[in-house]
Image (tube, rainbow, N blue to C red):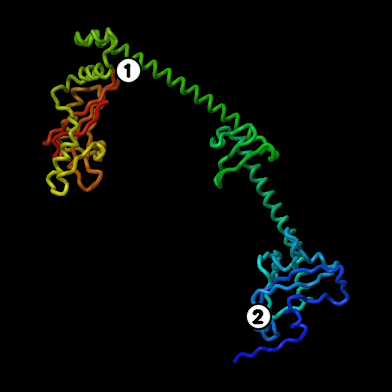
Amino acid sequence: MESVAAFTPRRQESLVSVLPAPPGADTATALAVTVTYLLSEEGRKASLLAGGDGRARQDLTVHVPAHRLHLVTVDLEGVARLKLRPRYEQLDGEPRVRRIDEPPTYDTPPAIEDLFRDAARNHQLERAYETQRRAEKERRRDAGRERREQVAQAFLADHTQRALVHPAPTPKRCYIGTQTGRILFDVSTDVGGARDIPPEAHRRFRADLRARRDRNLEERAAQLALHEEKKRVIAAWVAAHGTPDQQAREAAGVLPMDEAIEAMTGQAFAALGNRPPYVHDGIERLQAYLSRFPEHAGVALTREDLLVTSANVDRMTAAQFSLVQEVRALMPEATVTLRRHTLAWKRNSRIALPPVFGILVTQRVEPFTFRREYAVVASLGHQADVAISSVA
């Protein structure tokens, strides 16, 4: 069985809730101070053997003379405590002092002088810790100030850099984005080149706003001019080639531009008039395909259910290449492209129709760009009877 040695009466004194004042101390000028510490398991055993309560947390009251009041702290509630928590430690060979936010732990119940000695050591290390903290804080402040100055000099030297627009820069405050995050610059707290950042960032921000507004106005003016030019060209074309009904509606100002553009597109692609254009029947074809399966027979498709993928064809069969060349011969000034289109069901992308092909023809007739896509018959496309297309 494990044996536990008995302790001297001097140690046993420290287990009472109120310890007597040190010899020679004037209790009239001494301060009653709360002492809190912890006992390890060995210490709890010793406490029980000495007649104590054996609790892990020990709360005592001691009298501290006036000349030792530097070892005492008083909280906002007026409770005086011996400086045992937080405690400070400095390991051998390490210059840094560590702070530990818990009471000290003893393996034997301490005497009052032991508590005073530990509080004095804590008091000394606390000052070293605070000095160390101030030095580290100053180093971090200097490093931050140096980094801010580097960011500021780079920003001022590079006129293409901009401050973050959210929140918007002001003459007094702005944020600059860096690789490690954004940095706030404030004229009221910054010094050196960093203090020049907010007004310069605000000036660039306002200049960008003015430039953007000018560009928007120019683009708007160009769009209006283009629209007027299109109206003029349409009016001239309707007067020369339109039907009497179209001419009458144009004279009355009620002829839709889309109708006139469609008529002009038909004239521009007159050489391909005998070729079948695309018909938007993707919903019908996929609906017919799904009706073959009993579990999907009742599904009603909409345009949002279709997944259409289109791309230019780089490799062509002999028949496809011949067809492209034939269209190019009929429309020498147009751009002719073979397109491949796939159609699938969004709900289940594994359900898809075989690809279809189309001939996309683009013809520029100032100020319009006409586009039409023509169907590729099944003999020229892989199981394709109609091509997917778009007309602009």
Q: Which residue is drawn at 60% across and 37% down?
A: 174
Quadrant in the rendering for residue 155: top right
Q: What element carries label 2?
A: loop
- Point out the frontmost of discs 2 and 1: 2
Q: In this view, does 252 lie above or below 13?
A: above
Residue 14 locus on image (x, y percent): 75, 79
Residue 280 locus on image (x, y percent): 19, 32
Quadrant in the rendering for residue 156: top right
Q: Dot 2, how many residues are within 10 Å of its Cα: few (below 14), some (14-19), or many (20+)?
A: many
Q: Residue at x 73, y 76 (%)?
A: 17
Left or right of 25? Residue 209 is left
Q: What element carries label 1?
A: loop
Residue tagged 1 = 367
Q: Whole-Å distance between the Cαs marked 2 and 1?
A: 98 Å
Residue 192 locus on image (x, y percent): 70, 38
Q: Residue at x 81, y 67 (%)?
A: 31
Left or right of 10? Residue 291 is left
Indicate which disc, 2 or 1, sits on the residue closer to the N terminus.
Answer: 2
- Label 1 sits on what residue type? Pro
Residue tagged 2 = 54
